[in-house]
Amino acid sequence: MKTKAKRIWAAICLSTFVAIILLFSFSEALLVRAGIFMAPQGSGTADVAILEGGEGLETGAVNIALDLLSSGRASYMVVVLHRLSENKKQFALDEDYSDLVKKRLKTSGLSEKQFMVVVTPVHHPITLTEATIVLKALSKEGVKNAFLLSNGFHTRRSFLTYHYVGRPLGINIIPLAYFNDFQLENWWRHEEGLREFVSELFKLVYYQIRGYIPAGVDY
């Protein structure tokens, strides 16, 4: 078992290293296309807008989701948060974070019928666990189309995971990447952009090798 795990990690490291070397050996145009691949942008309208959070939410991401609702491109928002252990919660913050998010969304002008906050456990593989819980809940509500708002280069892996889970449930996923720390057109000029690209490319390869996102599936 340990030998198999070592082989998997070796394959991931080698694949990621080769991809990065090839990528940075070519022109800026290729770097832009690589960024677009890792951060896909869909269009159109959907039943709901799924906003991927983590331990917290970024204000810019929430504003994008609110714009989708106000423009009529979506009529409902689903906020996804990760459940924190008691030891990881911020000291002196006694109120549950999900409750704070709900209150803030209401003060932003949304009614309780326009949003839902889903708190998912931090169980490996985290994104697959999250997608399974969220989409099963939406399937019961009859949702057929959903925007997926994800941060930067995490979008590709998140989109493929949600798409894989959503397809047998009859839910079409439309990816919407957003950026806060750098811009897509020159991501390689920023330390945060380089770090995020390499990290997410590594994780994407890992998900596919482990079968969390089956290879060869038509997306």
Image (spheres, rainbow, N blue to C red):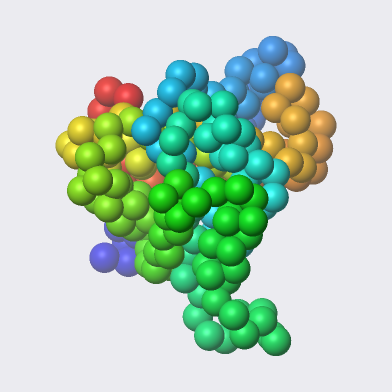
- In this rendered view, identify the residue nearer to me: 4 or 194: 194
Q: Examine the rendering and report whether any part of residue 102 can be seen.
A: yes
Residue visible at 47% across and 70% down in the picture: 83
Residue appearing at x 66%, y 81% in the figure: 93
Place of residue 81 in the rendered image (x, y in percent of width and height, measured from the top left): 49, 61
Quarter of the figure with residue 19: top right
Work out which quarter of the rendered image holds the N terminus and state it.
bottom left
Foreground pick, 93 / 109: 109
Who is closer to the viewer here, 99 or 18?
99
Occupied quadrant, residue 197? top right
| Residue occupying the point 62% across, 85% down | 94
The image shows a total of numbered marks equal to: 0
Q: Position of residue 85 (x, y in %)?
A: 50, 80
Return the x and y of residue 161 as percentages of the image width and height.
Answer: 36, 42
The residue drawn where x is 69% and y is 50% is 59
- Quadrant location of residue 125? bottom left
57 vs 135, left or right, is: right
Q: Relative to 16, is 5 on the left or the right?
A: left
Whether residue 14 sits left or right of residue 103 in the image: it is: left
* Residue 7 visible in the picture: no
Q: Is residue 76 above or below residue 102?
A: above
Q: Is residue 23 above or below residue 165?
A: above
Q: Quadrant of the C terminus?
A: top left
Image: 216 above or below 159: above
The picture places residue 210, in percent across and down from the top left corner, at: 32, 49
